[in-house]
Image: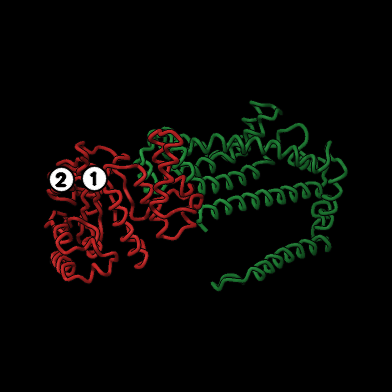
C-alpha cells in the first residue's frame, strides 16, 4: 500500500493517487468488458454506461428523463431527512439534558435502530401502498438515528463549564437549553446530520422499490425489468454522484461552523 | 452587607466507593468589600471552597453564607470568574456580557447602558462584536471579569483568574484589577497559586493546609499596606521591591512550603 507509511502527502500527490486508483478501476473494468470476459449484456464498458447516462439526461425512460427522476428522488429524500432532523435533533438534545427522558427512550431506540432502513420496506408498503409516505418513512428510518445520536452526544457531553456559567448568570432551564446547550452542541449536531443525510440517501433505492412512478430507484428497477444493464448502472452512477455532492455541501457547512467557532 | 461566611465547613467526595475528605472544618469570613486570597498546595481544596460559595456544590456539613443567606444554588448575586474563562464561544463580547442581565429581566436601555459602562471600565471598546476566539487570552479574561462585574454582584468569586495568562498580561491585569477595585469595591474571594499575586491584591491572605484542606493561618496584609504606603505606588514592581512586601511574601511562602514539604 502506497499510503501506509506515515509521511503526510502533499495535497496534489494525494489527489493524483486518487485519480490513479480510479483509472486502475476503470482500466480493469474496460479490459474485462472489451475482452468479453463477461457478457456485454451484463457488463457494458464504462463508456457505454456514461453514454447511456448522457442519453437519459434528455431522453425519457420509465416516464421521465434522468434529471426528473433525480428531482422526484430528491423531493422524497428532502422530506425524509427534514423530518428526521426535526424530530431527531430536539429529541436527542432533550435526552442529553433530561436524564429521565434518556432512560425512557434509549432502550426503545436501541432496539429499533437495528432494523435496517430496507427492512422497513414491507411495512411501509403495507401502510402507505405506493403513496409518498412509504419512501419518506424508509429514508427517515435511515436518517433519524444519526440525527438523534449527534444531538444527544452534543448535549450529553457539553463542557460542564458552560452550563455552570449559565447557572451562575441566573439562566433558567429553557434559556440554558436554547442559548447554551443548543449552540454548544451545534458541531456535534451537524456531524450527526451529515451522517444522517448520507444514510438517508443510501436508503433511497430501497425506498423507491415501492413507488409507482419516477425516481432514480424506480428508473433502476425498470431498467432491470428491461434487462438494460447500462440503465441500471447509469442510475447507480447518478446516485453516487449526487450522494457525493450532498456530502461535499454538508462538509463545507460543517467546516464553516467550526471555523466560526474558532475550532479549526 | 455582603460578607462571605464559611462556618465549620466539611466536604467529602466519594471516589471508588470511599469517602475522601476534601475540606475539614473550614471557617473563614470575607467581610463586606474585603478582598481575600486563598493560597495552598495543589489539590488542597481551594477550588472546592470557591465552588461551595458559588453554589455549584453543597457542603457535607457546616454552612456557607453570602450576604446573610445560606448558599443553596448558583446565582448572579455571586458572580464567578472561571480559570478557563468559560465565555460562550457562540456569543459576541456584548452577547456574553449582557447574558446575565437578560436573565434579570432588565429593560433594554438599562441593560445596554450597564453593558456600555462595564465595557468602558474594562477597556473593551471596539471589541463589542468580536467573538471570544478572536481575542487574546488577556482580552478574554477582561470579558469574563466584565461579565461578572456587570451583574453588580454581592460577591465576586475568582478561580485563579490570571492562571491562564502569560507573565506580562498577568501583571497588567493585576494592576487593572486594583484600579477597578478602587473605583468599584467588591467583596472578593480569589484563589491563586502565586503568592506575589495574593499579597499584591488581597486585604488578607488565607493559607490552607494540604488535603484535607483546613485554614492554617490568615495573614493580614491590609495593615502593612496602609502603614507602608503601597497604594501610593502605581506599578506592581515598585510594590514588590518594598522590604515590607518581601517580608509578608516570605512569611506566606514559608508557611506554604511547610505544607508542600510534608506532602512528599
Where residue B165 appears, as percent x and y from the top left, is 36, 63
Residue at image x 28%, y 43%? B78
Circles 1, 2 touching at the beta carbon (< 8 Å): yes
Color of chain A here? green
Mark 1 / mark 2, whichever is N-terminal: 2
Where residue B153 appears, as percent x and y from the top left, is 30, 42
Horizontal side of residue A186 vs A45, given as left or right: left
Q: Which residue is mark 1?
A: B52
Where residue B236 appears, as percent x and y from the top left, is 28, 66
Q: Is residue B54 above or below residue B106?
A: below
Q: Which residue is mark 2?
A: B9
Instruction: Look at the image and tell me in which quarter the C terminus of chain B lies.
Output: bottom left
Q: Secondary structure at mark 1?
A: helix
Color of chain B here? red
Instruction: Look at the image and tell me in which quarter the N terminus of chain B lies.
Output: top left
Q: Is residue B15 visible?
A: no
Q: Nearer the viewer, residue B200 or A249?
A: B200
Q: Nearer the viewer, residue B151 or B228?
A: B228
Marked residue chain, label 2 = B
Q: Is residue B165 above or below residue A162?
A: below
The span from disc 1 to disc 2 (Cα, nearest Å) is 9 Å
Residue at image x 29%, y 64%? B234
Task: Tell me the crowding category of disc 2: few under 14, some 14 to 19, or many 20 or more residues within 10 angstroms, Cα based.
Answer: many
Would you identify the image quadrant in which residue A32 lies?
bottom right
Q: Secondary structure at mark 2?
A: strand
Q: Nearer the viewer, residue B50 or A85?
A: B50
Amino acid at each position: 500500500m502506497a499510503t501506509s507509511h506515515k509521511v503526510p502527502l502533499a495535497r496534489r500527490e494525494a489527489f493524483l493517487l486518487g485519480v490513479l486508483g480510479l483509472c486502475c478501476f476503470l482500466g480493469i473494468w474496460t479490459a474485462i468488458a472489451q475482452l468479453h470476459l463477461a457478457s456485454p449484456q451484463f457488463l457494458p464498458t464504462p463508456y457505454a454506461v456514461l453514454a447511456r447516462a448522457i442519453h437519459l439526461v434528455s431522453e425519457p425512460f420509465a416516464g421521465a428523463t434522468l434529471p426528473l427522476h433525480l428531482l422526484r428522488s430528491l423531493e422524497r429524500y428532502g422530506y425524509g431527512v427534514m423530518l428526521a432532523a426535526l424530530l431527531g435533533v430536539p429529541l436527542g438534545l432533550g435526552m442529553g439534558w433530561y436524564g429521565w427522558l434518556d432512560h425512557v427512550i434509549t432502550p426503545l431506540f436501541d432496539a429499533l435502530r437495528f432494523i435496517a432502513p430496507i427492512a422497513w420496506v414491507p411495512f411501509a408498503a403495507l401502510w402507505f401502498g405506493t403513496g409518498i409516505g412509504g419512501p419518506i418513512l424508509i429514508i427517515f428510518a435511515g436518517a433519524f438515528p444519526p440525527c438523534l445520536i449527534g444531538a444527544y452526544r452534543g448535549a450529553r457531553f457539553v463542557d460542564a463549564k458552560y452550563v455552570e456559567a449559565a447557572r451562575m448568570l441566573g439562566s433558567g432551564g429553557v434559556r440554558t437549553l436554547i442559548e447554551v446547550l443548543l449552540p454548544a452542541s451545534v458541531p456535534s449536531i451537524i456531524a450527526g446530520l451529515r451522517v444522517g443525510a448520507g444514510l438517508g440517501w443510501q436508503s433511497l433505492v430501497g425506498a423507491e422499490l415501492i413507488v409507482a412512478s419516477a425516481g432514480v430507484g424506480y428508473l433502476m428497477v425498470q431498467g432491470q425489468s428491461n434487462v438494460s444493464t447500462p440503465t441500471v448502472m447509469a442510475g447507480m452512477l447518478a446516485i453516487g454522484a449526487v450522494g457525493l455532492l450532498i456530502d461535499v455541501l454538508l462538509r463545507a457547512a460543517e467546516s464553516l461552523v467550526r471555523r466560526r467557532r474558532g475550532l479549526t | 452587607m455582603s460578607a462571605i461566611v464559611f462556618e465549620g465547613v466539611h466536604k467529602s467526595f466519594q471516589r471508588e466507593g470511599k469517602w475522601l475528605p476534601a475540606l475539614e472544618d473550614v471557617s473563614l469570613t470575607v467581610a463586606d468589600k474585603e478582598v481575600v486570597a486563598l493560597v495552598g498546595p495543589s489539590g488542597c481544596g481551594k477550588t472546592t471552597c470557591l465552588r461551595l460559595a458559588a453554589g455549584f456544590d453543597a457542603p457535607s456539613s457546616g454552612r456557607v453564607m453570602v450576604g446573610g443567606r445560606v448558599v443553596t444554588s448558583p446565582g448572579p448575586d455571586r458572580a464567578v470568574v472561571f480559570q478557563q474563562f468559560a465565555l460562550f464561544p457562540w456569543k459576541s463580547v456584548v452577547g456574553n456580557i449582557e447574558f446575565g442581565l437578560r436573565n434579570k429581566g432588565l429593560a433594554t436601555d438599562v441593560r445596554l447602558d450597564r453593558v456600555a459602562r462595564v465595557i468602558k471600565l474594562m477597556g473593551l471598546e471596539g471589541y463589542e462584536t468580536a467573538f471570544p476566539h478572536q481575542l487574546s487570552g488577556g482580552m478574554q479574561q477582561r470579558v469574563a471579569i466584565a461579565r461578572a462585574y456587570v451583574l453588580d454582584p454581592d460577591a465576586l468569586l475568582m478561580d485563579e483568574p490570571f492562571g491562564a495568562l502569560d507573565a506580562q498580561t498577568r501583571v497588567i491585569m493585576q494592576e487593572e484589577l486594583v484600579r477597578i477595585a478602587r473605583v468599584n469595591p467588591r467583596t472578593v474571594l480569589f484563589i491563586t497559586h502565586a503568592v506575589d499575586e495574593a499579597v499584591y491584591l488581597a486585604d488578607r491572605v488565607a493559607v490552607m493546609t494540604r488535603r484535607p484542606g483546613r485554614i492554617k493561618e490568615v495573614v493580614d496584609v491590609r495593615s502593612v499596606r496602609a502603614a507602608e504606603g503601597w497604594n501610593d505606588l502605581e506599578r506592581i514592581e515598585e510594590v514588590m521591591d518594598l522590604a515590607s512586601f518581601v517580608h509578608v511574601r516570605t512569611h506566606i511562602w514559608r508557611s506554604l512550603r511547610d505544607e508542600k514539604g510534608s506532602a512528599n
